Amino acid sequence: MVFDVTKAESFENTKLWLQVIDQHSGENEKKLLIGNKCDLTYDRVVGHETAKKFADSLSMPYLETSAKRSINVEQAFTILAAELMSIPKIEASCMSYQLTTEPTASTTLTKSEW
């Protein structure tokens, strides 16, 4: 989830978006909160500590980036990839399924019977 550190409304909207995600996702959903535009220090309205505390309250990693200056962009993808790799895999194998009934003789239909 990315928000703009120079716009309070952007940060406030993340709370709503995360609620929507939680309503429509599974329990293994991995999230990362990213404060973008960290290079605009004089325009910042959302403090690092405020965003970090919010992320911590939801057990989410928090990272600040600048897409314009390529600050922490690669690290954001690395963190997200690590989070995704920690999801337990569900293994399903065709070999584990067993027939419960014996096969029966099939009837061949002619084209006119379709």
Image: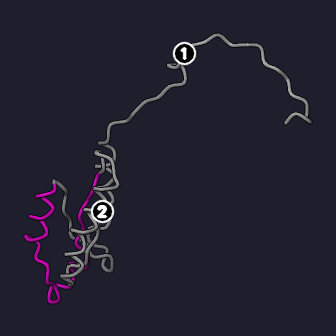
Which numbered marker is on residue 82? none
Classify residue 110 by image quadrant: top right
Q: Nearer the viewer, residue 76 or 53?
A: 53
Q: Quadrant of residue 80?
A: bottom left
Above or below: residue 74 compared with residue 11 = above
Residue 62 picture location, percent across and down: 18, 62
Q: In which quarter of the image is the C terminus?
A: top right
Q: Name the residue under label 1.
A: 98
Q: Disc number at residue 20?
A: 2
- Return the x and y of residue 19 as percentages of the image width and height: 25, 62
Report, in whole angstroms, how far the alpha carbon at label 2 lies from the one at label 1: 40 Å
Name which of mark 2 and mark 1 comes first in the sequence.
2
Residue at 12%, 64% in the rendered image: 54
**Amino acid type of the residue tagged 2 in the rendering:** Val
Q: Give the range drawn in magenta.
A: 30-58
**Residue at left 32%, top 76%?**
67
Q: What residue type is labelled 1?
A: Gln
